[in-house]
Amino acid sequence: MLGTIVNASAIIIGSSVGAIFKKGIKEKKKAILLQAIGLVAISLGITWIVTNLSKSNEPLLFIASMVIGGLIGESIDIEEKVNRLGKRFNSNKDNKLIEGLTTAVLLFCVGTLSILGPIESALKGDNTLLFTNAMLDGITSMILATTFGIGIMLSGVILFVWQGTIFLLAQFIGPYATPEILNQISIIGGILIFSTGINILEIKKIKTINLIPALFIPVIYNIPFINKFFNEVLSFFVH
């Protein structure tokens, strides 16, 4: 798990460096940085959606995933639980740490490199993708921490758990990490990153965290017996 350790460490180090710079930035400049990050998140989200939607063979799957995932997330009310936990560590209710952390986790964990990297590492002993990802994530975490603070380093812990789980389950996950599933995950990830950008810019409050279960629907859908059952049900209603 060397690649995953390096990747998570890069985020923690980058966040620490960014938090140091944050202390020397005036509030007026922090506001413009916040707006810049919001616009970048929206731009990245649109790019992920457009790029991957054009490659997808099932362009309607992400819609069903968003609906089903949203219903699951809202039923559990994941966002409320996360916000409640965040308030224990953050006395400033106006702080946007949760939104920043959500953005960081989505950027670091949803990308193709973060999913295929630990699979390649486990099955082939090749850490190239994870080392590449570490450099990108280290720089990104530093930028995010200059605005949202040291709390961004928590995304490094989350990434470690995420990639570590994929690494340990690589034998089972590998066959399901098809280009189509990765495209669907990237489309949904793009939508979620887009929505965090809207939240950061305070255009509209969207419960992005409650939509996160949507990321797992394409994987569940592509499990053979579930896919077969779904197609049989759909065929019954169509005919």
Image (spheres, rainbow, N blue to C red):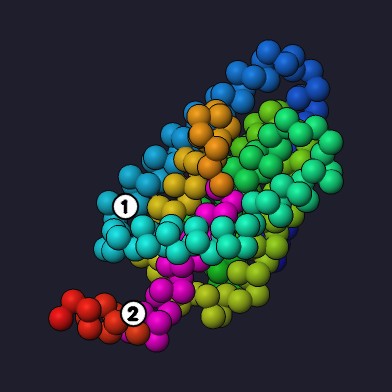
Query: Is residue 124 visible to the viewer in this orientation of the structure?
Result: yes
Residue 84 in picture, x, y percent from top left: 76, 49
Q: Identify the residue position indicated by label 2 in the image.
A: 230
Q: Residues within 10 Å of mark 2 (few under 14, many from 20)?
A: some
Q: Main secondary structure of the magenta part?
A: helix
Residue name at image x 46 percent, y 70 percent: 219
Amino acid found under the numbered disc labelled 1: Leu
Give me the C-alpha separation between circle 1 and circle 2: 22 Å
Residue 31 in picture, x, y percent from top left: 64, 19
Residue name at image x 51 percent, y 34 percent: 204
Q: Secondary structure at mark 1?
A: helix
Residue name at image x 63 percent, y 57 percent: 77
Image quadrant containing the N terminus: bottom right
Q: Is residue 217 above or below residue 47?
A: below
Residue 111 in picture, x, y percent from top left: 51, 53
Q: Earlier in the sequence, mark 1 or mark 2?
A: 1
Residue 178 in picture, x, y percent from top left: 40, 69
Q: Residues within 10 Å of mark 1 (few under 14, many from 20)?
A: some
- Residue 64 is tagged as none
Q: Are marks 1 and 2 in contact (CB under 8 Å)?
A: no
Residue 152 lies in magenta, yes or no? Answer: no
Query: Is residue 6 visible to the viewer in this orientation of the structure?
Result: no
Which residues are drawn in magenta? 208-228
Amino acid found under the numbered disc labelled 2: Phe
In the image shown, does 105 or 75 lie closer to the viewer? 75
For residue 78, which quarter of the picture?
bottom right
16 to the left or right of 138 = right
- Residue 53 is tagged as 1
Residue name at image x 37 percent, y 47 percent: 49
Residue 215 lies in magenta, yes or no? Answer: yes
